[in-house]
Image: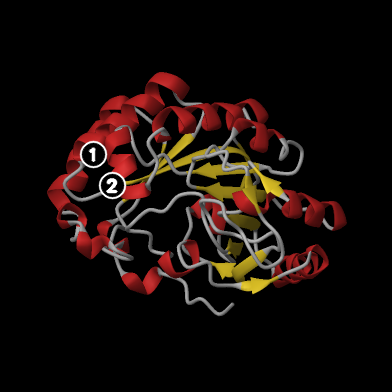
Amino acid sequence: MICNLCPRKCNATRNKTYGNGFCRCESEMKISRIAPHLWEEPCISGENGSGAVFFAGCTLKCVYCQNYEISHENNGKYYTENMLADKLRELVDSGVHTIEFISATQYIDKLIKTLDIYKPAIPLIYNSGGYESTDTLKKLKGYIDVYLPDFKYSDDSLAKRLSKCDDYTQTTLNAINEMLIQKPKLTFDDNGIIKSGVIIRHLVLPNHTINSIGVLNLIKENFGKKALLSLMGQYVPHGKAENFEDINRRITQREYDKVLKELIKLDLDGFAQELESADKSYIPQWDY
């Protein structure tokens, strides 16, 4: 296959044993973990968790990624569409409230084929770094119920240094706009589980509160209250963060409070984590 699924437009060659694109993914679907996940936003996890499918590889290369060994190193197990469909059935049978596809951009076409075989009757969530092609997102129309993008940066120079991406901000704004075109209304069931809509996540980085405040203002200016905002304080140095002095520590209470104050000022709806979430024990164990 020749791949242009993400905004990088690599025109990459991908086959069963080789991929020369930015993500280096082969053509075969590779997955790192499939299991109930209890630590998402309350409207996603509920009491029984979300059925999380972690795909190997990523179209971003965030130096601090908590999933570094799967997002950068592409560790995982190969799955056919039928194999994944069987796993989705098992997740549904286990009683999870939602199914969550995490960093699936590089396997969109195979994910769609999987959902053509078996589409669970519970809400399906597309969890991504926000850096998405609108053309690729349009393929998901009718398949995905809830979009859960990150909005990491309002500063493209920071995005380039930490995620190898110099067009992140506008590309992500365009992607979230497409998500809202597809899912313009937030709806929930009687138990508070989200059924449809968009939730935008933002992770506060140490020494970069100006970037975070910029992100919040861009969300307000472009989307108002059409989407929920999830402000995340769970940052811990991971991956190659030790090589970047400005992000080689956890965020302080003062930094988090500064961003939280802006969130309250802008009157955005959503969630805010406690800083106690900044603990490596919340990082999944990769069992492949």
Image quarter (top left, top right, bottom left or bottom right) of the C terminus: bottom right
Residue at 49% from the left image edge and 54% from the top image edge: 42
Label 1, secondary structure: give it.
Answer: helix
**Tag of residue 204:** 2
Q: Position of residue 23 (x, y in %)?
A: 53, 55
Residue at 62% from the left image edge and 42% from the top image edge: 11
Count of marks overlaid on the render? 2
Q: Nearer the viewer, residue 172 or 101?
A: 172
Residue at 39% from the left image edge and 19% from the top image edge: 221
Mark 1 lies on residue: 259
Task: Inspect the image, locate mark 2, and give the three-letter code of the amino acid beneath it.
Answer: Val
Residue 214 figure quarter: top left
Residue 259 figure quarter: top left
Q: Residues within 10 Å of mark 1 (few under 14, many from 20)?
A: many
Task: Inspect the image, locate mark 1, and give the three-letter code of the amino acid beneath it.
Answer: Val
Q: Position of residue 99 (x, y in %)?
A: 65, 57
Residue at 64% from the left image edge and 74% from the top image edge: 77
**Tag of residue 209:** none
282 left or right of 192 in image: left
Image position of 230 with respect to 261: above or below: below
Label 2, secondary structure: give it.
Answer: loop
* 1 or 2: tag closer to the N-terminus: 2
234 left or right of 86 in image: left
280 left or right of 184 in image: left
Marks 1/2 in contact by CB < 8 Å: the verdict is yes
Q: Nearer the viewer, mark 1 or mark 2?
A: 2
In space, the residues marked 1 and 2 are separated at their CA atoms by 8 Å
Q: Position of residue 12 (x, y in %)?
A: 62, 48
Q: Position of residue 269 (x, y in %)?
A: 41, 34
